[in-house]
Image: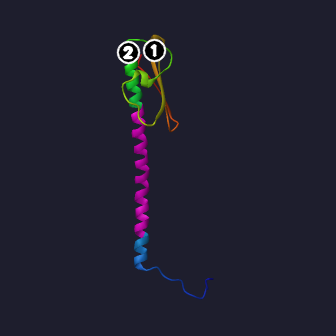
Amino acid sequence: MTLSPDLPQRAATPEERRRAGRMFWLILLLFPMVVGTMLAYLSVRGRQVRDYGQAVVQEVATRATPLQGRVPCHEVASAKAPASVKSCEAERLSGGKVTVTIQTSGGQKYQLHNAR
C-alpha cells in the first residue's frame, strides 16, 4: 500500500493523545525507579559481603591459635557466608595484621584488613 499525497493525513483523536501522554509519563517515571531499585539491590548485596568479611577479620584477630598460611573462611568463622560469596580466604600476617580476601560470583574481589 502506498500513501497518496492527495489524501489528507488522519488526525490523532483526543483519546490517542491521552494514551500517548500517559505512556510518555509512565516511561519517564518508571525508568529512574528501575535503575534505583537495581542500585539499591547491588548496594545491599555488597554490604552483606563486606559485613561478612569484617566478621571474619574480627574472629581471626581474636583467635588464640595462629593461622597456618591462607585458610578458607568457613574453617575459622562462625558466621554464614552470603550466597554471592564464591571464595573466601583468611590470612594472619606478621605483626598481627589479618587479611581476608573475598571473591564474589559477580566477579568483584574484596580485601579487608584489621586496624593493626
Q: Are marks 1 and 2 in contact (CB under 8 Å)?
A: yes
Which SS class for mark 2? loop
Q: Quadrant of residue 98?
A: top left
Chief secondary structure of the magenta portion: helix
Location of the N terminus (image quadrant): bottom right
Q: Which mark is residue 67?
A: 1
Q: Quadrant of residue 114?
A: top left
Give the magenta range.
Answer: 21-49
- Return the x and y of residue 12 as percentages of the image width and height: 46, 79
Q: Amino acid at mark 2?
A: Arg
Please say whether residue 41 is one of the residues in the magenta stretch: yes
Circle 1 crowding by C-alpha within 10 Å: few under 14, some 14–19, many from 20: some
**Total marks in image:** 2
User: Of all residues shown, which one is farthest toward the right?
Assistant: 2
**Residue nearest the observer in this picture, 35 or 69:** 69
**Residue nearest the observer in this picture, 73 or 27:** 73
Q: Amino acid at mark 1?
A: Leu
- Return the x and y of residue 6 as percentages of the image width and height: 60, 88
Which SS class for mark 1? loop
Q: Which mark is residue 63?
A: 2
Please say whether residue 81 is one of the residues in the magenta stretch: no
Location of the C terminus (image quadrant): top left
Circle 2 crowding by C-alpha within 10 Å: few under 14, some 14–19, many from 20: few
